[in-house]
Image (cartoon, coloured by chain):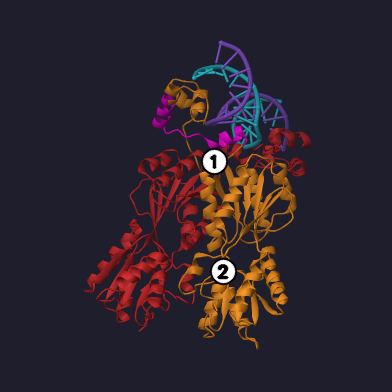
Chain colours: A red, B orange, C purple, D cyan
DNA sequence: TTGTAAGCGTTATCAG
DNA sequence: CTGATAACGCTTACAA
């Protein structure tokens, strides 16, 4: 199938009239080599089209330079934005991203981690799903770094990056109350991941503190279509909600579209809506959605910084803020 | 920075009481090994947490299993959908995707291809930008396969996948005429890539055949915000267009939002809009955009099939269809 | 600063 | 079917 014929350091050495190790040194940052020798090597390398074999280098150095990104739903705005930020920052740090798609079953996350191990990835970053504990242990035991983004769990060893959502529920409730809303609802998916469920629980609790009940509805995957269905369900209730907190922006946008086009509701006059993520579409004129901004660049920066750092770094947990973004989907006064 | 300590085949061999090569065979599909021996090996491997080192395997087999994806604007709906399809299909074919972000300068595409060569990727798939001819040659010379998606150019060696857009311009003009539109416009970005420019040229030509002039406007990058600016420019003209073909869906959605919210126009009553790509957002209720569907799965399938195929495959060019998707942004009668 | 030589973890070859 | 042995292309002591 493939018969690649790459030029090796040996050939470069011959052409440049130096030893094999001189070639190696020429391509190693901070190696002790005479400028003149390096020039000769580089010249020969350029002429022959030589490129260091990172497979071999990784084998020797015990450091592949590869970082494995484990992701599902990568077509989604939030996920793709995060992938973009991560690949960019990894490249800036001299690493290269390997991308594993884990759509379908959760078992795939384990497969992904296995791939990472096979390629001796320096680290893995898990954006979706939860790897089996035994595999996490295996990674850690093998000295492979592991970053878990938004999977609030109790694994030992890896870096866990989560959002600090202590205040979000409070903010939303306050916003809704100020807007004069009293019939609150929460639109959730059936994904049931910890971070999503925490959002629901927090909102219900915060509302109760103000003496308000929340109508909770859950349906399907976490996306636009589910938002529409959730609107159909919530908006046909006897006590129609006048404010809804949607578990993500995508759900919120679907909700808004159904509310407007199927129920002829006006937003924010008849219904206030808040989402979560601040995907680009949330800012589009048709929606102008009030939401919380995922600190994407900070997440990526934190992940990369940690996996580049020298210290052993025991199990560590990081909490980042998701700032409230005020737009027009909630009445202001 | 990293001191990974993975278990090697040697250790497994010792534990299983067999030779190193037996272990290798146990993990090689179709190798001649006794079932009992394989069982012993697998058992020991499982117990020790052994995983074949693909760096070493790639070195020996001269086939890394890596396919390099070269992409810019990966946060965009179309791009991320294509990445998703490609990673999925590559995995199904037993390959793994390496992702290189080439945002910023075009020179980065060359850097990306260099990375692919360094990791001895079995193939590279370029979704954005144009690599330098010398690098393409280098890849080809080294026996690395190369797929260029939507970069209609004249390189030798690689597989080129393009859309067959011969009929699209015609379809759009016909649709606009049927809707009773006479003042046509084309909203383009300033990216100036061949495929985008071909869209413009084709549309202008098709309109002229019907005796109609097209007002062409170009602005900024190819995205939502540019669409808004383009609307501002086109809709303030003396002869206000009553139909616009936007170079991509993202541009079209921005255009629609500006037309509606800044010029209070009704779509499709005052203005007909057609886009290109059929990103998920085009189907959202707020837009319901008539557009052409990128055959994403077919593109991915074609790319993967070609790079898995055995035949030497001389320079080859593939043209896929982008079906017209009728929605409500164009008056039907 | 340079070259020599050993070794990284595999797989392919070739006897047995 | 199995086990030794020689690659694969590179880095890194070590000695010169």
Q: Position of residue B146 (x, y in %)?
A: 66, 48
In the picture provided, is A178 more to the left or to the right than D1?
Answer: left
Disc 1, disc 2: CB below 8 Å?
Answer: no
Q: Chain of mark 1?
A: A
> In the rendered view, would you say B127 is above or below A62?
below
Which residue does the numbered mark 2 point to in the structure image? B291
Q: Nearer the viewer, mark 1 or mark 2?
A: 2
Which chain contains the residue that carries disc 2? B
Quadrant of res B237: bottom right
Circle 1 — which element?
Answer: loop
Check the picture and name the quadrant holding the C terminus of chain A.
bottom left
Left or right of residue B289: residue B137: right
Q: For the residue labelled by badge 2, is the local secondary structure a helix, a strand or a loop?
A: strand
**Residue B99, image x and y in percent?**
57, 51
Q: Left of A106 or right of it: where is A60?
A: right
Q: Residue most toward the left?
A: A211
Marker disc for residue A141: none
- Decide whether residue B43 is among the magenta residues: yes
- The answer to if B111 sits in the magenta stretch is no
Image coordinates for residue A41, horizontal then vertical, percent:
74, 40
Q: Does the image show residue B219?
A: no
> Label 1 crowding class (10 Å Cα cut-off): few <14, some 14-19, many 20+?
some
| Segment tinted magenta in the rendering | B39-62
**Residue A239 x %, y %:** 25, 76
Residue B164 shows in the view: yes
In percent of the image, x 41 and y 69: which residue is there? A254
Residues under labels 1 and 2: Cα distance? 47 Å
Residue A1, image quadrant: top right
Quickly name the residue at label 1.
Answer: A63
Q: Main secondary structure of the magenta part?
A: helix
Mark 2 nearby-residue class (10 Å; few <14, some 14–19, many ≥20): many
The vertical placement of A50 against A284, above or below, is above
């Amino acid at each position: 199938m493939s018969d690649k014929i790459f030029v090796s350091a040996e050939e470069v050495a011959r052409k440049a009239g130096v030893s094999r190790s001189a070639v190696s040194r020429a391509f190693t940052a901070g190696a002790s080599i005479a400028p003149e020798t390096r020039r000769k090597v580089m010249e020969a390398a350029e002429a022959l089209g030589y490129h260091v074999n990172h497979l071999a280098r990784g084998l020797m150095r015990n450091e592949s330079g590869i970082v494995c990104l484990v992701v599902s739903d990568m077509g989604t705005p939030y996920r793709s934005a995060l992938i973009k930020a991560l690949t960019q920052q990894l490249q800036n740090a001299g690493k290269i991203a390997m991308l594993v798609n884990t759509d379908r079953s959760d078992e795939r996350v384990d497969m992904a981690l296995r791939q990472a191990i096979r390629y001796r990835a320096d680290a893995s970053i898990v954006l979706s799903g939860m790897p089996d504990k035994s595999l996490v242990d295996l990674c850690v035991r093998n000295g492979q770094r592991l970053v878990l983004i938004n999977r609030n769990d109790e694994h030992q060893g890896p870096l866990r990056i989560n959002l600090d959502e202590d205040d979000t529920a409070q903010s939303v409730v306050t916003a809704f109350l100020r807007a004069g809303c009293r019939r609150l609802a929460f639109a959730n998916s059936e994904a049931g991941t910890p971070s999503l469920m925490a959002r629901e629980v927090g909102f219900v609790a915060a509302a109760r503190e103000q003496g308000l009940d929340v109508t909770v509805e859950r349906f399907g995957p976490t996306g636009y279509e589910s938002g529409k269905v959730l609107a159909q369900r919530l908006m046909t209730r006897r006590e129609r909600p006048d404010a809804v907190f949607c578990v993500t922006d995508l759900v919120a946008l679907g909700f808004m579209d159904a509310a407007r086009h199927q129920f002829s509701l006006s937003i924010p006059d008849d219904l206030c809506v808040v989402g979560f993520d601040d995907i680009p579409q949330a800012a589009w004129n048709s929606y102008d959605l009030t939401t919380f901004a995922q600190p994407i660049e900070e997440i990526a920066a934190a992940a990369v910084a940690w996996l580049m750092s020298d210290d052993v770094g025991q199990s560590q947990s990081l909490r980042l803020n998701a700032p409230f973004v005020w737009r027009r989907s909630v009445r202001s006064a």
